[in-house]
Amino acid sequence: MAEHVTIGRIGEHVGQQVTIKGWLYNKRDSGRLQFLLVRDGTGTIQSVAFKKEIDPASWEAAAQVTQESSVIATGLVRADDRAPGGYELGLTAFEIVQLAGEYPIALKSHGVDFLMENRHLWLRAPSQWAVMRVRATVIRAIRDWLDDHGFLLVDTPILTPAACEGTTTLFETEYFGEKAYLSQSGQLYNEATIGAFGRVYCFGPTFRAEKSKTRRHLIEFWMVEPEMAYVDLAGCMEVEEQLVAYIAQTVVSRCRPELEILERDVAKLEAIVAPFPRISYDDALVILAEAGEPLEWGDDFGAPHETILGNHFDRPVFVHRYPARSKAFYMAEDEANPELSLSVDLIAPEGYGEIIGGGQRAHDLALLERRIEEHKLPREAFEWYLDLRRYGAVPHSGFGLGIERTVSWMCGLHHIRETIPFPRTMGRIYP
RNA sequence: UCCUCGGUAGCUCAACGGUAGAGCGGUCGGCUGUUAACCGAUUGGUUGUUGGUUCGAGUCCAGCCCGAGGAGCCA
């Protein structure tokens, strides 16, 4: 009985008789010879069946097997330059677990709508396999870095009583006769938990009922939100750049095969090392004007502006001190100029745009009370939040990093919807 | 919500207002080293939907539905 091994570690079994359990990716045959490409989740390997060297039942199974049938293949592992991947399996036995019907996704080019309609099957494709593995690596890198730098994972609720920011559209649901909303950020809650733990982060799904139809938007997406007591704007940027650089270098070192499948220019990722350039909103306006996209002071950047700024540098760029009026109510104000907020966005190169938004939070009670009034927010829902300014308020900062935008950037993808297993976009909630 | 583009075979796409086609997939056959193999045969259609113009509509017109790209908003 041959040992069951995974294709990902097939190189350790050259010269051995092994069993692979997986699915048929593709088949080519020429008379007395059949090439069966088998994948098992860890990789893909070419198996070769010679009619003379295999029992008739196995030969017949190999002849009958269809694309994406589940199969068990046993044979001798050997290195062979002619095989994709460098190794192949000289079959001695081949068994079909379930014979698949005509597979919808033929090995050819397809339209996005068709692929999304078959997302549950599309995930088996090499490109999607690679993206999901990069996603897992990005998430693990984030958690490793934060866990190793004194941050405690503190999860925040998904069902919330009111808008965290009050500016964007929320998904409304019913909570035992009361209105409740799906969370669009855990930040406010983590401003509370830093009082207990110092440095925290939450990591979970967030929901925005915005009718956004662009390649950078999802209705449901994942976000990591670190929050830090006794850290100012400058300290916040230092943490952000260390984290982002660590993510990029981890992907570069651990996901070579995936990046190759995705045809990603690895040099672009290798360049993502600290320090990142820091420019003010006012500096950014100068760059934009020189690039022929002038912007009125006080206006927020649109997608083309972000692209210009991102492409102006070979690594991510911090843009800090935005006009207070264009930012959320909880942003601290710049003492040197109260019209400015101590906010900072991190804009990725290559047109990937904003991947982090954050900054220093207002910790002055009177300022917050005034902002809540100006933004016409229901004060009673924020009493607990105001308490944080009454009992041991400290300067503090935090940010939110969008997982899917980061994965999209790492993978060099055109559209964010490929970075999450089952994307929720405007007009699609199937499968 | 607004702007632009699109909807024809399972999929990707053709088709001057005049008999709806090709490639891929599927099926059958051939080939001992294939690389989305190749060669031959074969299968496959309520042209998104409703109405209109016309001798005749996949094609022209109007409404509706669905999707894509972008804007706004944001991670």
Image (cartoon, coloured by chain):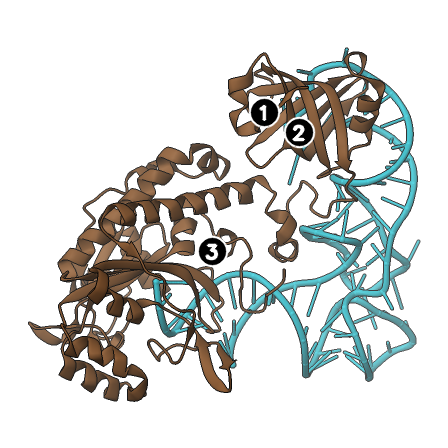
Say whether disc 3 or disc 1 marks the residue closer to the N-terminus.
1
Q: In which image quadrant can residue A74 be found?
A: top right
User: Which three-letter amino acid code belongs to the residue tagged 1?
Assistant: Pro
Is label 3 on the same chain as label 2? yes
Determine contact: label 3, label 1, CB under 8 Å.
no
Nearer to us: label 3 or label 2: 2
Residue drawn at the location 44% of the way across and 37% of the way down: A259
Q: Is residue A337 left or right of residue A344?
A: left
Amino acid at circle 3: Ile
**Between marks 3 and 1, how big is the CA–CA gap?**
29 Å
* N-term-proximal mark, 2 vs 1: 2
The local secondary structure at tag 1 comes to loop
- In the image shown, does A31 or A24 lie closer to the viewer? A24
Image quarter hosting the N terminus of chain A? top right
Task: Say which chain is cyan.
Answer: B
**Residue on which disc 3 sits:** A416
Q: Residue at x 55, y 23 (%)?
A: A10
Q: Are marks 2 and 1 in contact (CB under 8 Å)?
A: yes
Chain to which mark 2 belongs: A
**Can you tell which mark lies on residue A428?**
none
Relative side of A396 to A64, left or right: left
Frontmost of labels 2 and 1 is 2
* Residue A367: percent from left, percent from top: 15, 81
At label 3, counting other C-alpha atoms closer than 10 Å, the crowd grade (few under 14, some 14-19, many 20 or more) is many
Check disc 2 and report the residue beneath it: A37
Q: Colour of chain A?
A: brown
Residue at image mark 1: A84
Q: Label 2 amino acid?
A: Leu
Q: Looking at the image, which is closer to me, B60 or B39?
A: B39
Which residue lies at the image location 27% right of the left edge and 51% below the top edge? A316
